[in-house]
Image (cartoon, grey):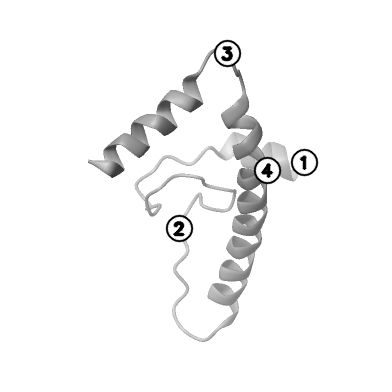
Amino acid sequence: MAYEEAMLGLVRDALEISRPNAFLNAFLPFQQRIARLGSRNSVVQTTLKLTLPDVADVYQGAELWDLSLVDPDNRRPVNYRARIGLLE
């Protein structure tokens, strides 16, 4: 019950009309810090994956940032035009 009330209070505060952007103003610095750390972590993981001995787990079309919450697989269509454009 206390957890539910705390969650409802958070939602009420985030949506409160009298203080627009109060939630975003508090949240965005945290989000930016976490995004920066997450991108660094991704680069480190990819470097380790491609340089340590073992079979690298590399997927066709996964060369760019992929912010999906599931593992990529080789059944996804690859946007070759976007990749060619970036190379040019």
Quadrant hosting residue 29: top right
| Residue type at the position of mark 2 | Tyr
Residue ID at (37%, 50%): 70
Q: Nearer the viewer, residue 79 or 4?
A: 4
Q: Which residue is mark 4?
A: 29
Q: Nearer the viewer, mark 4 or mark 2?
A: 4
The amino acid type of the residue labelled 1 equals Glu
Q: Residues within 10 Å of mark 3 (few under 14, many from 20)?
A: few
- Residue 88 image label: 1
Element on which disc 2 rests: loop
* Above/below status of 52 relative to 63: below
Q: Residue at x 47, y 54 (%)?
A: 60
- Label 4 with label 1: CB-CB less than 8 Å: no
Q: Position of residue 86 (x, y in %)?
A: 71, 41
The tag earlier along the polypeptide, 3 or 2, is 3
| SS at badge 3 | loop
Q: Give the number of the disc on residue 59.
A: 2
Q: Is residue 88 left or right of residue 4?
A: right
As measured in the structure, the alpha-carbon distance from the residue carrying label 4 to the one carrying label 1 is: 34 Å
Q: In front of the other: label 2 or label 1?
A: 2
Mark 3 — residue? 18
Between the C-alphas of marks 3 and 2, the distance is: 48 Å
Q: What is the spatial separation of the Cα atoms under label 4 and label 2, in whole angstroms?
A: 33 Å
Give the mark nearest the N terminus, 4 or 1: 4
**Residue 44 coordinates in the image, percent (x, y):** 62, 69
Mark before the other along the chain sequence, 2 or 1:
2
Location of the N terminus by quadrant is top left
